[in-house]
Amino acid sequence: MRKGSKARSEQAKVLSFVPTGEYYFNKGMKAYQRRELKRALKYLNRAFQLEPLEPMIACQLSIVYTEMGDFKRANELLHDVLGNLDPRMTECHYFLANNYAHLGLFKEAYEHVSVYLDKEEDGEFQEDAEDLLELLELDSDLSVEDLYEHDDLIVQQEKAKDLLESGHFQKAVDTLKKVIEEYPEFWSAYNNLALAYFYLGEVEKASATLEEVLEKNPGNLHALCNTAVFYFYQKRQDELDQLIEGLEKVRPLLHEHRFKLGATFALVGHSDKAYEWLKSLQKIGFEGDASYYYWLSHSAYETGHEQTARNAWKKVVELNPEKEGSEPWNDNKSEGFENHITSILKKLQSEYMEEKLFGLFLTSVSEHQRAVLTHADFCEVEELSIVEKVYLAHVLNTNGNGSMKVNQEIKNMHEVALHLYDCHHPISSVDSGLFLTWFTIAYRGLKERESFKNTKAFAAAADFVWNRLRNDKVTKKQMCDRYNVSASTLTKYIAVVESYLP
């Protein structure tokens, strides 16, 4: 008995320890005070999981998210506190005001800082809140009514970026031109407009837009990075090298600028510098979008950091499942607009004939054709023009609604696009400018009853003219060899193609 009692006594000394929300909260606060933000985020998230009804934990967690640049998640937590956990935590209004001001959503910032000052006459953040209110009223030079308009500006800018990223270039141009007309010093819109012009093949307009930004806002990092991208695609190596040398000396503070710099280095092939910047953001807990993880994965893989590359690519696929199969280490990757369902659908819903025709062509060569055709957002067939209906019928290998002559013209138009695709696939953002140019030419030609009979000659001529419009150095001999046509034939069809350009 004594022996057993002793064993029980010794066993009783082993204490069971189950960490509580308070335990992880305290660890998180210690990490936060040491500026170990990633560790603080880990502990505070665990505390919030254990005690999801504790407003103090949610509020502190939101502060960490704010400092790591994830304003969306921070605001979600703060709204949850005010809406569900503890409406009396008025300091959340002040935190929300700061976050919205950083995002450029000045109406929301104004509303929340005003609520905070109304509810807290002697609050902890009173002086800071008054400074923020003064900043919103004076520095922004906007009335309360104008703040609503300014928020609409942000919405329009995001809409334009979405159009741009999905290859909806002409629509993006129209949207951004309206934004700039109303807000002539909104430089972000200029930069995106320059990209849209460039991808449409209107290089002179793109360059002029960036020059205007740099003239009126010297040192604009986005404009400098976009210029580097233009030089890269135009193979202007000497100018690119000179600009890259300058960009390597830049040390931006904002997360957005660090990401832009890293992505630019990655795109132009400077993987070491790209990885340095993009990985530095990850180390401080930066939570970017799919494009951030895309460039991190590519730069990591190119610099031998394979595990980082694979981890980043998991995030890419999680955020954009259509990218599966186009990993940087996959030799058979098939990324491109033709396999991006969302981009295809947006083109099919465009107001512009050339973009709809391009969307139908993408559908014809897409690995996801069935998914596009059966998607709820596929275009309304009844609303298509006769040309679009006939082209869709041709894509589906069914009988068209037009005459045999129109069918043959459409068939030839499609054949030209296929020749272009043979030489330009997968279709990148830049390549899409070529196809949009071709379908612009084709639509104008159809109205003139052009037959497009010599499909290879039309493809060679369209390719040559497009390159010349972009100031890319390409010779007629290169085009002749590429499409197997004679020099005299190419010259003849270049004149035909140019006659159909706007």
Image: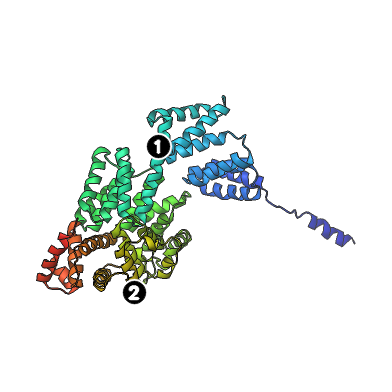
| Mark toward the start of the polypeptide (1 vs 2) | 1
Whether residue 403 is visible to the viewer of this picture, yes or no, is yes
Q: Report the residue at 28% width, 47% height from top.
A: 224
- Please state the horizontal and vertical placement of residue 119, each as a whole percent of the image: 58, 28
- The amino acid marked with disc number 2 is Asn
Q: Report the residue at 46% width, 30% height from top.
A: 132
Front-most of 424 and 149? Answer: 149
- Which residue is disc 1 drawn over? 149
Q: From the viewer's perspective, tell me whether residue 16 is left or right of residue 217.
A: right
Residue placed furthest toward the top: 121
User: Relative to 174, does residue 122 appear above or below in the rendering?
Assistant: above
Whether residue 60 is visible to the viewer of this picture, yes or no, is no
User: Relative to 462, does residue 251 appear above or below in the rendering?
Assistant: above
Residue placed furthest toward the right: 1
Circle 1 residues within 10 Å: few <14, some 14–19, many ≥20: some
Q: From the viewer's perspective, tell me whether residue 412 is left or right of residue 318.
A: left
Front-most of 296 and 151? Answer: 151
- Please state the horizontal and vertical placement of residue 33, each as a whole percent of the image: 54, 40
User: Relative to 392, does residue 81 appear above or below in the rendering?
Assistant: above
Q: Secondary structure at mark 2?
A: loop
Q: Give the Cα separation between the discs numbered 1 and 2.
A: 50 Å
